[in-house]
């Protein structure tokens, strides 16, 4: 009797998960996208901060497109999607974070990179979910790193965190 009970539960679990996912109630990525929403348009995220690597706009824009494609069933369009995402990079600054006094000289022992984006989100099917919001992320670096020598992997990490924050706000309702 025990072995029969064990074999029923995995099948039942799969069946319940499939039913819930098909109805649009739950997805394994945590999104809560209405079944009538099929597309998203993601405009180029321009770098208006005036700092950062020359390809920062491209890195951020591609990160958004890739993340939404990986984590939803939405088709990414050039424009006029059911969901529309646009914005700009408004902050890319490196500032001293931890200062230590050495004699009469104050020296930074850590530098903090702050990257901020302003996002305008439009939900063509449900305008009550529209927003215009700033998202900011920081990461600390040794004092030997200046704004021109920030490793690309660090920028990718920061971008991924920003994209996840926007994703959660737009389609996960967090």
Image: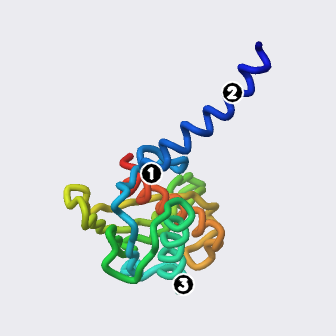
Residue 160: quarter of image: bottom right
Report whether residue 107 is seen: no
What kind of element bears circle 3? loop
**Where's the N terminus, which quadrant?**
top right
Distance from label 2 to label 1 (Cα)?
Answer: 28 Å
The residue where tag 2 is placed is: 8
- Given this view, does label 1 or label 3 mark the residue nearer the observer? 1
The residue where tag 1 is placed is: 31
What kind of element bears circle 1? loop
Colour mode of the rendering: rainbow
Decide which of tag 2 and tag 3 comes sooner along the chain. 2
Q: What residue appears at the point 58 percent right and 69 percent down from the top-left corner?
A: 155
Distance from label 2 to label 3 (Cα)?
Answer: 53 Å
The residue where tag 3 is placed is: 55
Residue 158 location, x and y as percent? 54, 63
- Given this view, does label 2 or label 1 mark the residue nearer the observer? 2
Tell me whether the residue at label 1 lies in contact with that at label 3, contact meaning CB atoms closer than 8 angstroms: no
- Given this view, does label 2 or label 3 mark the residue nearer the observer? 2
Q: Is residue 122 left or right of residue 73?
A: left
Q: Is residue 57 left or right of residue 33?
A: right
Spot the residue most to the top. Answer: 1
Q: Is residue 21 left or right of residue 40?
A: right
Q: What residue appears at the point 30 percent right and 66 percent down from the top-left corner?
A: 121
Residue 59 location, x and y as percent? 54, 77
Decide which of tag 1 and tag 3 comes sooner along the chain. 1
Residue in front for this viewpoint, 40 or 165: 40
- Crowding at dot 3, Cα within 10 Å, few <14 / some 14-19 / many 20+, comes out as few
63 vs 15: above or below:
below
Residue in front for this viewpoint, 102 or 29: 29
Residue in front for this viewpoint, 84 or 110: 84
Decide which of tag 2 and tag 1 comes sooner along the chain. 2
């Amino acid at each position: 009797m025990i072995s029969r009970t064990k074999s029923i539960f995995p099948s039942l679990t799969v069946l319940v998960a499939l039913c819930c996912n098909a109805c649009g109630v739950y997805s394994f990525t945590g999104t809560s996208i209405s079944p009538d929403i099929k597309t998203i348009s993601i405009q180029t995220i321009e770098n208006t901060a005036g700092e950062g690597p020359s390809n920062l706009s491209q890195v951020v824009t591609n990160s958004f497109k890739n993340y939404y494609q990986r984590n939803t069933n939405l088709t990414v369009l050039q424009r006029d999607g059911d969901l529309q995402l646009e914005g700009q990079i408004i902050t890319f600054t490196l500032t001293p974070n931890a200062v230590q006094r050495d004699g009469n000289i104050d020296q930074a022992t850590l530098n903090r990179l702050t990257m901020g984006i302003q996002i305008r989100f439009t939900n063509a099917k449900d305008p009550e979910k529209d927003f215009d919001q700033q998202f900011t992320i920081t990461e600390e670096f040794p004092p030997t790193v200046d704004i021109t020598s920030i490793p690309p992997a660090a920028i990718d990490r920061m971008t991924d965190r920003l994209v996840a924050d926007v994703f959660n706000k737009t389609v996960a309702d967090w």
